[in-house]
Amino acid sequence: MITTIFDKAAPGKNATGFMTDKQVEGVPAGIPASLIRDAADSLEIPDIPEVEIVRHYTELSRKNYGVDNGIYPLGSCTMKYNPKINETLTNLPGFRDIHPLQGLQDNRGIQGILQLLHETSLMLAEITGMDAFTLQPAAGAHGEFTGNLIIKKYIMMKGLDKKKNKIIVPDTSHGTNPASAASCNFEVIEIKSNEQGLVDLDQLAQALAPGDVAGIMLTNPNTLGLFEEEILKVTKMVHDAGGLCYYDGANLNGLCGVCRPGDMGFDIIHVNLHKTFSTPHGGGGPGAGPVGVKAFLKELLPGPRTALKDGKYSFTLPEQAGLGSIKAFHGNIGVVIRAYCYMKALGLSGLRRGTECAVLGANYVKVMLKDTICVPYQRRCYHEFVGSDDGFPNHVNTEDIAKRMLDLGVHAPTIYFPILVHGAIMIEPTETEALARLDGLVNIIKQIHKEAEETPAIVKSAPNDMPVKRLDQVLAARNPVLTVKALKKMQEK
Ligand SMILES: *Cc1c(COP(=O)(O)O)cnc(C)c1O
């Protein structure tokens, strides 16, 4: 049963919680009649003392689970801890109070933020091996959309857009990849991975043969957490067929500071600042998906971007040939500031260390669970690995395991994604978890395996200790209950 603040109303009590002798009757003197609401449109506001309101919301917040409570091994999402100092720095008045239009005429007053944006672009270029970046795109998928538009524009400039209208997307790519290509009016060709979970070069050659491919979108490490070892061959084959190579760098903490997509032959890349570069995310909060390109595509980048000349920073408007703007003003600057602070604090060696810890943590958990969770692709993983529910006792499935984990005090991993693994359980411990936390996670999953053997009912009925039981997820998505009135109606049924 969900309690709302209305259930806690105490009619006749005012905000202080003291008893009043009587409700204030009628309308206080001096308020014009036109401003008085009639009963029909009056808001339903519960009579409730302030202290009970505070307790209500505090109680709600305690039911929530976040990375500040414990490990959050949600694969692909990189729910790592983000240093609080970044929040403080981003909220400095000099950053926070700038108006987006400030500096378009005269940028002497905003040299600081311009320098920050400029240096962030340079650092991202250095880290990824690209030549130029735009900071405008607001999310990973938005970066992919931008990248596909760049491919389209490039193909058009070559006069090949009638001929080259297909984008190759391996089945190990993130789900946003085919969606982004399709939104740019490309036809998507899916190619199946080989038995090692990597791009199948024969399939790739077949897909390229007709000469109608505009490019490939690749996630590396792929969604199985595996590194595409033949990556140089893959990018060369696509280039030889006249296509461009797009790199989905949302999960850069599998290789950040160790190797660079630009050196693997990629022409375009996006990175998710809100995963690798330390912006808290989830719940649809702001993100940023900067897009980087090799020099030959630079003029196509959306803007405004920044420039440095004679020691002065300025905005540069998008070039005539390019995409124009892909977002209002300069993108989600608050997210860029956090990423800047994070990169500056760690330096290249620190970023590399983060990657090493992320990869080590994922491999540690995978090995510790080798007799518990079946892992179909048995190779060394990167920052995450994908197991399956195959072989769990008594037909306990992935959903049961995930729900039981909530009872036992941790967030569930990503489940049923990627779809090429049956009953997928995708675990990404992230680099910010200490050994004891990783062991805690391992022990919880081992305990669930034991319960599945001995007392399967407790796993199949999970969650048993959460405020709500299993939701009908389809119904919840189709008919979300977002108001107290709708909730009451539902509860009356
Ligand atoms: C998260 C993710 C995306 C999408 O990023 P959003 O910011 O959620 O749009 C794309 N690709 C991969 C590999 C991801 O993990």
Image (cartoon, helix red, strand yellow):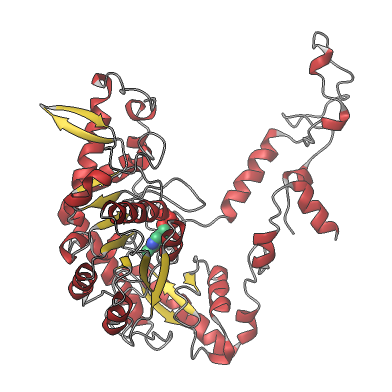
For image coordinates 44% across by 51% down, the residue present is: 281
Whether residue 129 can be seen here: yes
- The answer to whether residue 73 is visible is no
The image quadrant where one finds the C terminus is bottom right
Residue 213 left/right relative to 70: left
Q: Position of residue 331 (x, y in %)?
A: 37, 39
Q: Is residue 367 above or below residue 324?
A: below
Position of residue 234 relative to residue 84, above or below, is below
Residue 476 position within the rendered picture, expressed as x and y whole percent measured from the top left: 67, 61
**What residue is at 37 percent from the left and 64 percent from the top?**
165
Q: Quadrant of ligand 1?
A: bottom left
Of residue 431 and residue 329, the one placed in the foreground of this image is 329
Residue 249 spot, x, y in % from top left: 30, 60
270 sits to left or right of 400: left
- Return the x and y of residue 163 as percentages of the image width and height: 34, 64
User: Which of the 4 quarters of the picture holds residue 468?
Assistant: bottom right
Image quarter where the N terminus lies is bottom right
Residue in view at x 34 percent, y 43 percent: 323
Q: Residue 387 lies in what quarter of the image?
A: bottom left
Number of numbered tags placed on the structure image:
0
Q: Residue furthest left?
A: 310
Apparent side of residue 250 relative to residue 11 in the rendered image (left or right): left
Residue at horizontal 17%, vertical 56%? 129
Left or right of 360 in this view: 69: right
Q: Is residue 215 above or below residue 461?
A: above
